[in-house]
Image (spheres, helix red, strand yellow):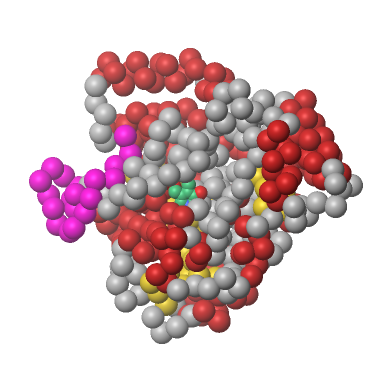
Amino acid sequence: MTDARSQPAATAPSGACSIPLVDLKRQHDFLRREIDAAFRAALDESAFIGGSRLASFETSFARFLGVGRCVGLANGSDALAIALTGLGVGPGDEVIVPAVSFFATSQAVRRIGADVVFCDIDPVSANLDVERIESLISPRTRAVLIVHLYGAPVDMTAVLEIARRHGLLVVEDCAQAAGATWGGRRVGAIGDIGCFSFYPSKNLGALGDAGCIVTDDHELATRCRMLANHGGLAKYQHDIGGLNSRMDALQAAFLEIKLPLLDRWNDERRAIARRYRNLLGGSDLDLGAASQEDSVFHLFVIRTRRQAQILARLRANGVGAEVHYPTPLPLVKANADLGAQPGRYPHAEAHCASAISLPIFPLMTDGEIEQVASAVLDAVAAP
Ligand SMILES: *Cc1c(COP(=O)(O)O)cnc(C)c1O
């Protein structure tokens, strides 16, 4: 049940860009002593699967989110598939998914044999257009898979209202939004189940792959733990079909070190976003998703009609800008069999053809922010 996935490297190859999209080394240098100590302690114990470190992180993260249970998993992609299976979604069911996200979002639905129904996005936020959800509901619709894209929370009040009215399950893909809040509650703790990725470059990142699900439903949490542990809670207990998708104890120990910094680092991301907005405000760039103040800014995404040209100029000037994502999910090759034609998801297509992500990461300096902003203004001003 593992996907062969490839995600762009989190940091630019050394020398290619003077300001990378994300600088993980800076975070880890800042935490080096604690990380070294955690690694040494794990080595001394040589207990790598399950155990007290995993249990401790699960408790800490659940408490941080204000939710009853957290189950550590191997990665965010499995978290989505396990969450859906745990909820009883499977073949014959339809799941509504935004047309713009990372590939894993729609693939999670497909790999459990359910049918994806894509929802076009809101042209400003780039999140799924909540007002469109009802028009996509059929008698087979079981769930809505919400993605808080780039770290900006979706209007969960409206989503829950629609879900209640139609008896739908709500799954939150919080891979990009750890720590974000909607209406005073942390995302992930709002729907029926929340799914997180701790891929290294996420706002809360491990030193390798990791993920989790969170829910207030204890039975659902237990089912997810069994699904991720060969179908049981104990050795040689295989009560349901399952796979191996556990979080390593070592990753749990590293995440426990980083968790107390998450709110502070999200505040830093917000401050960087404000600074960018001030510096870029006068230009004719479309700030779109980048203007959302309640985002935790996993990515700072601007839009321009001259995507390729501006991207090339930024790269030439040492700015590690990227495109998230170049292709709407209905049009990626792996989803070609679903038969979506170009023009069917116009807002998603327009977004993917115009989005540019600028560098943003905790511990980014004022000088770097100014350098990126002036490179953007130069690129925009160029003929
Ligand atoms: C990163 C990401 C995932 C997948 O998480 P992995 O831990 O890399 O498997 C899923 N959905 C979204 C929106 C993501 O950004």
Left or right of residue 292, residue 27 in this image: left
Position of residue 151 measured from the top left corner of the image (x, y, whole percent): 60, 49
Instruction: Please tell me whether residue 318 is drawn above or below residue 42 in the rendered image.
Output: below
In the image, is residue 243 part of the stretch drawn in magenta?
yes
Q: Nearer the viewer, residue 81 or 237?
A: 81
Label tally? 0
Left or right of residue 323, residue 38 in this image: left
What residue occupies the far right of the structure in this picture?
Answer: 282
Left or right of residue 237, residue 332 in this image: right
Position of residue 54 measured from the top left corner of the image (x, y, whole percent): 33, 35
Examine the image and state in which quarter residue 373 appears.
top right
What residue occupies the far front of the structure in this picture?
Answer: 383
Whether residue 249 can be seen here? yes
> Residue at the spot x=43%, y=30% of the render?
207
Q: Nearer the viewer, residue 216 or 313?
A: 313
Instruction: Please tell me whether residue 373 is drawn above or below residue 117 in the rendered image.
Output: above
Examine the image and state in which quarter residue 148 appears.
bottom right
> Residue at the spot x=32%, y=32% of the render?
249
Instruction: Please tell me whether residue 47 is drawn above or below residue 67 in the rendered image.
Output: above
Whether residue 143 can be seen here? no
The part of the chain drawn in magenta is 230-248
Left or right of residue 53, residue 106 in this image: right
What residue occupies the far bottom of the structure in this picture?
Answer: 139
Position of residue 142 measured from the top left corner of the image (x, y, whole percent): 40, 74
Magenta stretch mostly in which secondary structure?
A: loop
